[in-house]
Image (cartoon, rainbow, N blue to C red):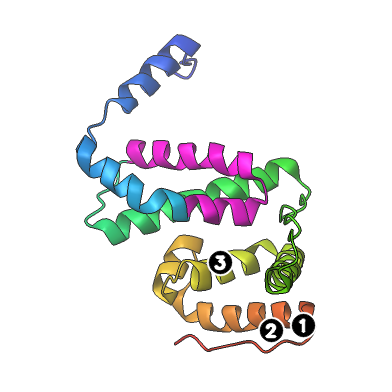
Amino acid sequence: MSNFTFTNVERLEAAAGEVDVPFEMDEDTFRAFYDRTARALWAYLARITGDRQAADDLLQECYYRLLRARVSLDDESHRRNYLFRIATNLARDGYRRRATSPELIPNVDEAQGADTAAAARADRCADVHRAMGRLKRRERELLWLAYAQGSTHQEIGETLGLKTGSIKPLLFRARQKLAALLGGAGTGGRRA
């Protein structure tokens, strides 16, 4: 029995058998879930990868993996957290494959026209984009989930695989570093 090996055909048949696992959501429920989560998930992926095309590809892969998952996801919150966890892991896998960090934030189009308020807003936005691009990946993930997605510390911990108690100090340090990169601007409001 020690000489037993799988052939490629046997491996493919075994993998094909795994794909036929029934999914807990019907098509309408999945479509509604997708409509509620896809935009936020894509924004998260685009922010942490810095590549819109990669975000498109990863978005599809996230939902595919969610559909193939053999986990019991009781409610919308669990599904959403699991989906963001998949996205985080896929983005990290991409970083590992590339072995070097790409430019993290795409260039922001310069404001057009004479509207000085719009130009000032575009300048502030560009400054934040550059500063976020200089943060470590985990710092970007923390800040994005906390402030752009409005996730709780528990949700952030579940998504990033961290202990809930470590989120508050990690967010504090990430905010401090972002503020320093922005030229000493205040850290803003505190998260409980």
Which residue is identified by label 1? 180
Residue 184: name its quadrant: bottom right
- Residue at 71% x, 56% y is 105
Q: CA distance from mark 3 to mark 2?
A: 15 Å
Q: Do residues under tags 2 and 1 come within 8 Å of each other at their CB atoms?
A: yes
- Residue at 71% x, 77% y is 178
Seen in the picture, residue 18 relative to 84 is either above or below; the reply is above
Would you say 184 lies left or right of 82 here? right
Q: Please state which amino acid type lies under the numbered disc 1.
A: Ala
Q: Position of residue 55 (x, y in %)?
A: 57, 44
Which residue is identified by label 2? 176
Does the magenta run of residues contain 49?
yes
Q: Please state which amino acid type lies under the numbered disc 3.
A: Trp
Q: Please state which amino acid type lies under the numbered disc 2.
A: Gln
For marks 3 and 1, the one nearer the N-term is 3
Q: Position of residue 188 (x, y in %)?
A: 59, 87
For the view shown, which residue lies furthest in the front direction?
114
Q: Position of residue 128 (x, y in %)?
A: 70, 70
Tag 1's secondary structure?
helix
- Answer whether residue 36 is visible to the viewer in this image: yes
40 or 119: nearer the viewer: 119
Mark 1 closeness class: few <14, some 14–19, many ≥20 residues within 10 Å: some
148 or 64: nearer the viewer: 148
Q: Position of residue 115 (x, y in %)?
A: 71, 69
Give, as a single range, the part of the protein colored magenta. Answer: 41-69
- Quarter placement of the C terminus: bottom left
Which residue is identified by label 3? 144
130 or 164: nearer the viewer: 130
Q: CA distance from mark 3 to mark 1?
A: 17 Å
